[in-house]
Amino acid sequence: MDGNGRWAKSRGLPHIAGHREGSRALRRAIEAAIQSGVSWLTIYAFSSENWRRPAGEILGLTGLLRRYLRSEITELKQSGVRLRFIGDRCRFDSDIQTDLEAAERDTAVNTRLNLTIALSYGARAEIAAAARAALEAVRAGCLEAGDLGEDVFASFLATAGMPDPDLVIRTSGEQRLSNFLLWQAAYAELVFLDVLWPDFDHAHFGAALKEFSRRERRFGARKD
Ligand code: IPE
Ligand code: MG
């Protein structure tokens, strides 16, 4: 979800106003996913690197997160959304950590849309943590080093049990993954949209799905 700052700047508004509008775009994206029958949606809301932003912006963002968790959960629950969070949640204030756990617990029976929100998430940190966990398992005698193949390794990632993404959409015209799901997106189709995140709507979601449907996926194999 990129482009909140540019959206705000172009209107002479403070950066946080872009983040606030971005949370409305998130609501639209979730609706669009449900309407399109997409059953797994992962949102990159805040990266481990975003902690380097000015303290005022961090405060604004964590405030928005707090409000989002309090105001949206009931509706998400009713819409059949199951929430999960990936990333280093220990870096958030303890009341937020409690709300994250409650949101996961309260929506755990839902199956219509699996919504994962990446918060304080970085793929390299996730992979390093998985390597440490796998080493621990070997040291504890629960795992043979020779059995540590791709699938076993993936089971140590934060996304264990989740399917790999088929499509990654990045907004704002930037063409980078920025440390998002680096392991999981190995064969994802990448779609870069020239729209600032706060302007993202159902039509952009539909256009990305249409572009995805035109791609020919071979997963390294040959077609003939
Ligand atoms: C993305 O918008 C939202 C977060 C990183 C939380 P930006 O804040 O990166 O917006 P730009 O890139 O400055 O336009
Ligand atoms: Mg940005």
Image (tube, rainbow, N blue to C red):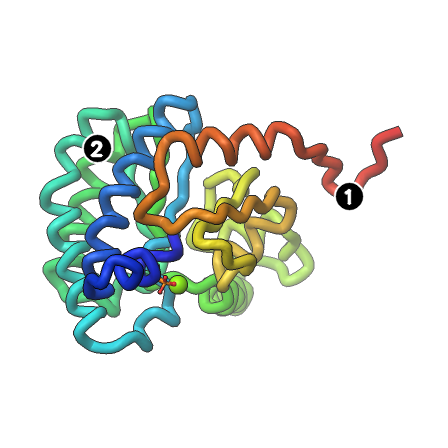
Q: In this view, does 187 lie to the left or right of 194?
A: right
Residue at 57% across, 55% down: 183
Hey, what amino acid is under mark 2? Leu
Q: Position of residue 119 (x, y in %)?
A: 32, 58
Residue 15, disc: none
Q: Where is residue 189 in the image (x, y as percent from the top left)?
A: 61, 42
Hey, what amino acid is under mark 1? Gly
Q: Position of residue 82 (x, y in %)?
A: 29, 34
In the rendered image, is residue 70 in sight? Answer: yes
State the residue lying farthest toward the front: 11
Badge 1: residue crowd in 10 Å (few <14, some 14–19, many ≥20): few
Secondary-structure class at tag 2: helix
Residue designated by label 2: 76
In the rendered image, is residue 140 in sight? Answer: no
Residue designated by label 1: 220
Secondary-structure class at tag 1: loop
Residue at 19% across, 54% down: 65
Residue closest to the eye, 14 or 110: 14
